[in-house]
Image: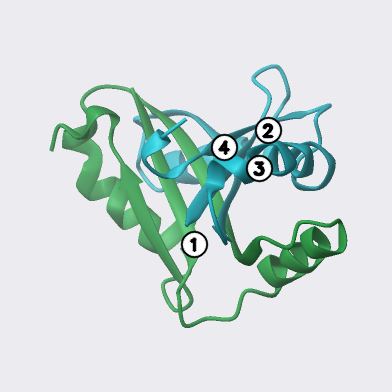
Chain colours: A cyan, B green
Amino acid sequence: MKVKVIVTPKETVLDPQGAAVREAMQHLGFDAAQAVRIGRYLEIDLEGDAVVHEPKLRELCRDLLSNPVIEDYRIEMPNEKK
Amino acid sequence: MKVKVIVTPKETVLDPQGAAVREAMQHLGFDAAQAVRIGRYLEIDLEGDAVVHEPKLRELCRDLLSNPVIEDYRIEMPNEKK
């Protein structure tokens, strides 16, 4: 069962990597890009029921996969059976 | 209009970062994680119609946002109106 975790910089936090990509896009003639924000995308293969593992996974997201001071995370369960 | 681009390592390519996270998860008592793969997640604010910009965006994904030798990308349009 595949669970996706997406970690993004908080809205209020500057994202220099995203700003650099936006500038590169504009430099390459793509002026339609107003803003770019870059985060991490994780695909986790879970054994068993994803719902059972969710609390522990959420704990790991906070402690291991994201920096809660500057980043948000969200978990996407398959089919959103919650 | 927000378009999402997800860049992931190809299935056949080793993902040492993902392997390290899987090991860290198991070390922290989360044995259910069988495999972890890590990619990049981009949120691009586009001015105007996303469908109009798609060909150029696809070109940029190939040339700027991903390394086509070892990475795949996919574009998620809002509401998938394609």
Query: Is disc 1 on the same chain as disc 3?
Result: no
Q: Amino acid at mark 3?
A: Gln
Please identify the quadrant where the N terminus of chain B is shown: top left
Alpha carbons under labels 2 and 4: distance apart: 21 Å
Task: Name the amino acid, label 1.
Answer: Thr
Q: Quadrant of the C terminus of chain B?
A: top left
* Residues behind callouts 2 and 1 on a single chain: no
Q: Chain of mark 3?
A: A
Where is residue A21 shown, x and y percent of the image? Answer: 55, 44
Residue designated by label 1: B8
Q: Residue A61 appears in which quarter of the rendering?
A: top right
Are circles 3 and 1 on residues that touch, CB within 8 Å?
Answer: no
Please indicate, yes or no, whether residue B59 appears anywhere in the rendered image: yes
Q: Residues within 10 Å of mark 3 (few under 14, many from 20)?
A: few
Looking at the rendered structure, the secondary structure element under dot 1 is: strand
Side of B40 where B46 appears, left or right? left
Residue B72: numbered disc: none
Q: Are marks 4 and 1 on the same chain?
A: no
User: Can you see residue A39?
Assistant: no
| Residue B32 figure quarter | bottom right
**Marks 4 and 3, Cα distance to the nearest angstrom?**
23 Å
Tell me if label 3 and label 2 are in contact, CB under 8 Å.
Answer: yes
Residue A44 in the figure: left or right of residue B82: right
The residue that appears at 33% across and 47% down in the rendered structure is B75
Q: Which residue is mark 3?
A: A17
Label for residue A15?
2
Which chain is mark 4 on? Answer: A
In this view, the mark in front (4 or 1): 4
